[in-house]
Image: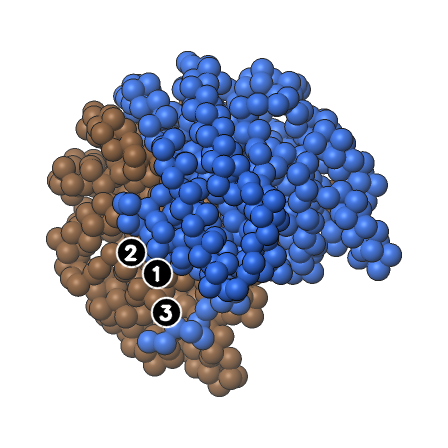
Chain colours: A brown, B blue
Amino acid sequence: MKFENKYSETVKRIKSNLIRELLKTAGDKDIISFGGGIPDPETFPIKKMSEIANEVIMNEYRVSLQYGSTEGDPELIKQYIRLMEEYEGIHGLTEENLMVTTGSQQALFIVGTVFLDEDSYCAVSKPIYLGAGSAFNQRNPKYISIPLEKDGMNIDYLENELKKLDENGEIDKFKFVYTVSNFHNPAGTTLSLEKRKRLIELAEKYDFIIIEDDPYGALRFEGEKQPSIFKLNNGERVVLLNTFSKVLSPGLRIGVIVANKELIRKMVLAKQGMDLCSSTLTQRIAARFIEKYDLFEEIKPTIELYRAKKDKFMEALEKYLGDIEGVDWIRPEGGLFSWITLPEGFDTMELFEIAKRKKVIYIPGETFYVDEPERNTMRVSFCLPSFEELDEGVKRLREAIDEYAKEKGIELKLK
Amino acid sequence: MKFENKYSETVKRIKSNLIRELLKTAGDKDIISFGGGIPDPETFPIKKMSEIANEVIMNEYRVSLQYGSTEGDPELIKQYIRLMEEYEGIHGLTEENLMVTTGSQQALFIVGTVFLDEDSYCAVSKPIYLGAGSAFNQRNPKYISIPLEKDGMNIDYLENELKKLDENGEIDKFKFVYTVSNFHNPAGTTLSLEKRKRLIELAEKYDFIIIEDDPYGALRFEGEKQPSIFKLNNGERVVLLNTFSKVLSPGLRIGVIVANKELIRKMVLAKQGMDLCSSTLTQRIAARFIEKYDLFEEIKPTIELYRAKKDKFMEALEKYLGDIEGVDWIRPEGGLFSWITLPEGFDTMELFEIAKRKKVIYIPGETFYVDEPERNTMRVSFCLPSFEELDEGVKRLREAIDEYAKEKGIELKLK
């Protein structure tokens, strides 16, 4: 049977995941990979988690192995409200302000479903988190791409775009701004306090919603913690997305949405048709884990490890790339990623092949755009390679850059 | 903030789940409920599962707690291919023919996303499984509702509808027939072998896909096992949906799609934006469980229990409702459900209030229609109440029926 004419327009639009394809071709063990965006599995608290899994299955099987409500495990929601109070200073939440999702990816998908039609606008950062793009793309909205600066989204640019929409009488179709507020994936940047406040002002002026995606916030290794946009706005028009993937384990597939209760009700309706409920087993494991242990004490060694790796990585970048004019990178205060910009004329997708031969890989930046990409950028993650590999990997990257420049006849200007 | 004008057209269409609302109002412990469609938690193999969970976390954490591929855990897929060979006689499957979903609900949602646009047609049974309706509704397709008979969908009716579409030049927009082949939810019916074959003939003639949803097939307590439509068609144009929810535990949230590899590739692309991957922890637990234990030996006691309850329930229906002219019900050969039709003039939604006062509840049939409902029907599940409750519940139901008839001035004709 030929299936081509049976597919929906939605699925015809979906492109295969470039990152996956790239990483597939690079399974070689000698390769140093800055490509992954995943936590170090050696940091998972396996002993504690297996004990809790045992208790949750043996003693709570009537809940933990049964269907659950679409909203999520009430015990997990209760514990999470406590975490939000203790660690984020967010008070006054009730169970109606939260829902559990199958990882943050589902939260993004639900956001897309609840707010976006084909004639809707949303503003996203340039570059954008790939998973947000793949979730929103299924709704085929109109994107407004806002350049990222070192302190986050360029708010002047956003304001100007909103003005234009307003003048064109289309501001009603503008639904939300999507932002990764801390240690952006892919760019490593953090939205400054001033910009957070300006974003809220704009949201009030132009009546839109802010989607604050914060998977990495707990992984701050330096600098001052910023209040969440959600907190600054008292949760009025902010939808906060959190996840256990970076602080406990991705394998649980648990995300949490915190928002106005009216929005939560709509999002629950959407989720019902999508997967009925997330795993009650992994939800209850997470609930008992955060009840029994101090999650933020637990991840301190992980944060220390990532901080040391980040320092080593920054040192290597300075050592091997610091002398090239036009090369720049983000110094993240937390999270898993930095973002390197090479001089004009570089195409990191082409460079990838040379780098692979030199046994180092990264994610070409062009993957992270919903419109015209900047081709001289790359995402690099420092959390999985060893300290030696961090140094050696950047050394190899420099070799690849030199070879690419030679091949293409680009003259590298040295400082 | 007013959110109403921010919502998508999709989410505005979603209605709240009536079953949930009904069951919410009926938390009273004295109530005998035929409403649930969930397995008996006392049948869950908790000891074996907690041992496996422990091993899977302690020894396989690099996989079981990490992100996984969108296609699903390779170990689970390998084991599932073996199950399909041993129990379904389906040979020649490779890993490219399968993918894992977050429960069967996600499989239905993916099917909707991959095949349906607003101008697409699909044929569904009348009544329809509620979860399928809520998944497909998000795509807003055009439904063709096919009446169910005691041996499944009325194929003549379907053929006639297809002919009409063909004559109107719209047959290209017809994407699939959706059917629950064994022990239908809500109706308890099983599609006969002859109808399975005729359905495939029609699919070939009119070039459409068959979505065969089989969550209950392993729960056969009598009669002869029918080959799956998938097997009869060598998987050419059939998408088979299975789940671990009824044979192991719903809390794992694991469904499996078996289909042509081209379709699987498209469905994987769709899932990627939806939740990236299903829980790697629960997938690996399921994989090791079915590797170590014979799933179908394990569920034999469950099947025996459900069979005995079904017998008791049928006996009670005969005893208390058998004398009323125009009352009919399905005698299921497996699964969790029967379907009762009351005489013309009954409205089971109105009857619900009286029944609740009499301390017995069920699901009003009108919940299970995507178009004009039959209001004199109800779904009843026999797997959770005790044997005594099965008898007492039907007795109460008869009292409610008598009272309703009296209130409405309906004269019950007795045989």
Discs 3, 1: same chain: yes
Indicate which disc residue A69 carries: none
Label 2: few (<14), some (14–19) or many (≥20) C-alpha neighbours in 10 Å = many
Label 3: few (<14), some (14–19) or many (≥20) C-alpha neighbours in 10 Å = many
Figure quadrant of residue B170: bottom right
For the residue marked with disc 2, what is the amino acid?
Leu
Q: Mark 3 points at which residue?
A: A209
Residue at image position (41%, 68%) is A176
Q: Mark 1 lies on which chain?
A: A
Q: Where is residue A198 in the image (x, y as percent from the top left)?
A: 28, 74
Q: Is residue A367 above or below residue A148?
A: above
Q: Circle 1 sits in a helix, a strand or a loop, which is it?
A: helix
Residue at image position (27%, 45%) is B29
Q: Circle 3 sits in a helix, a strand or a loop, which is it?
A: strand
User: Mark 3 against mark 1, which lies toward the viewer?
Assistant: 1
Q: Is residue A231 above or below residue B360?
A: below
Dots 1, 2 in contact, CB < 8 A: yes
Name which of mark 3 and mark 1 comes first in the sequence: 3
Q: Name the residue under label 1.
A: A264
Query: Could one spot residue A396 in this view of the protein?
Result: no
B50 left or right, relative to B237: left
For the residue marked with disc 1, what is the amino acid?
Ile
Name which of mark 1 and mark 2 comes first in the sequence: 2
Q: Mark 2 points at which residue?
A: A98
Frontmost residue, B69 versus A8 = A8
Q: In this view, does A255 lie above or below A112?
A: above
Q: How far apart are marks 1 and 2 (CA)?
A: 7 Å
Q: Mark 3 lies on which chain?
A: A
Q: Circle 2 sits in a helix, a strand or a loop, which is it?
A: strand
A48 left or right, relative to A13: left
Residue at image position (64%, 58%) is B141
Q: Where is residue B18 in the image (x, y as percent from the top left)?
A: 45, 57
